[in-house]
Image (spheres, grey):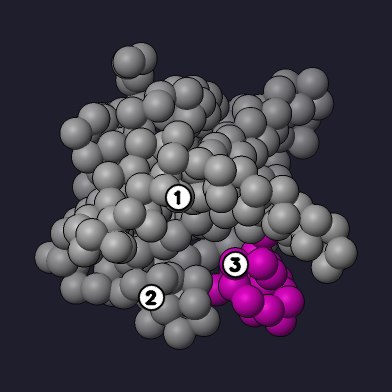
Amino acid sequence: MPSFSHVLLEKDASEHIAWLTINRPQRRNAIDDLTIRELAEAIEDIGSDDAVRVAILTGAGEAFCAGGDLHTLPGGEEPGAWASENTDDISRSFKSAQRLILGLQGIEKPVIAMINGVAVGAGFDLACACDIRIGSPKARFMVAYVRIGLFPGFGGTWVYPRTLGSMGKAAEMLFTGDFMEAEEAYRLGFLNKLVPEDELKVTTLEMARKIAAGPPIAIRLSKLMLYQGLEFNLETALKMAAAAETITLTSRDHREGTSAIRESRKPLYEGR
């Protein structure tokens, strides 16, 4: 298992769960280029590990992720520093970001965001890229780019309407840079669960364990079709569903699931 300087990757093989933690609490888990690369590498490692069936993404300390680390941008925090930077350097930074966002949605395993505090700018984008989001009342969300004259370069204009549930709410957050509080995020369905702070980890683990105990092939195909289906018409979606169903119908996991029902026991899925 790789080791990182800004990210913690922990795996529990017995429960098939991986914990991925942004570990920069002194910077409220703001991310720089190194953190982005390490997150992308960790996601790829999780994706290639057959012992892991679900991942949890969170932040150390009291924040989920406070966005991009302004101290490490070209020119530090000098106003307008990027305007004079080499566009090739900027392009390389965005390629790392794209690798991370595509990795989160492209990984075959579900990713749960455990949101323990602010998720701002790139931190909000990370939360959006996860499949399930569980938060405490301390969770707050902001599309911060507009506040410093930037465009959301992590694919926000594509993902916000899909995760927030409406073009109107996405536009409001994009244009104003106002915070969305946890209660509203839950009401809109952006947060799957909103729980007291002291129950956040337990609730997230319960969800992860439930998913990890499920049939890996069916869950993997469900995630794949969930995102690809956003671009399909109904006819294509039906054809893809038939292909996926054929795979699951002929799997050992399907036989195990039906046997467990007949025998009134919990199924033990192997991902075959």
Query: Of callouts 1 and 3, which one flags the residue occurring earlier in the amino acid sequence?
Result: 3
Q: Is residue 81 in sight in this rendering?
A: no
The span shown in magenta is 156-181
Figure check: 254 above or below 86: below
Q: Nearer the viewer, residue 40 or 150?
A: 40
- Residue at 35% x, 36% y is 270
Mark 1 lies on residue = 254
Q: Please say whether residue 15 is one of the residues in the magenta stretch.
A: no
Mark 2 lies on residue = 182
**Between tags 2 and 3, which lies in front?**
3
Three-letter residue code for mark 2: Ala
Query: Of callouts 2 and 3, which one flags the residue occurring earlier in the amino acid sequence?
Result: 3
- Residue at 68% x, 79% y is 166
Mark 3 lies on residue = 163
Query: Of callouts 1 and 2, which one flags the residue occurring earlier in the amino acid sequence?
Result: 2
- Residue at 28% x, 51% y is 267
Figure check: 152 above or below 169: above
Q: What element carries label 1?
A: helix
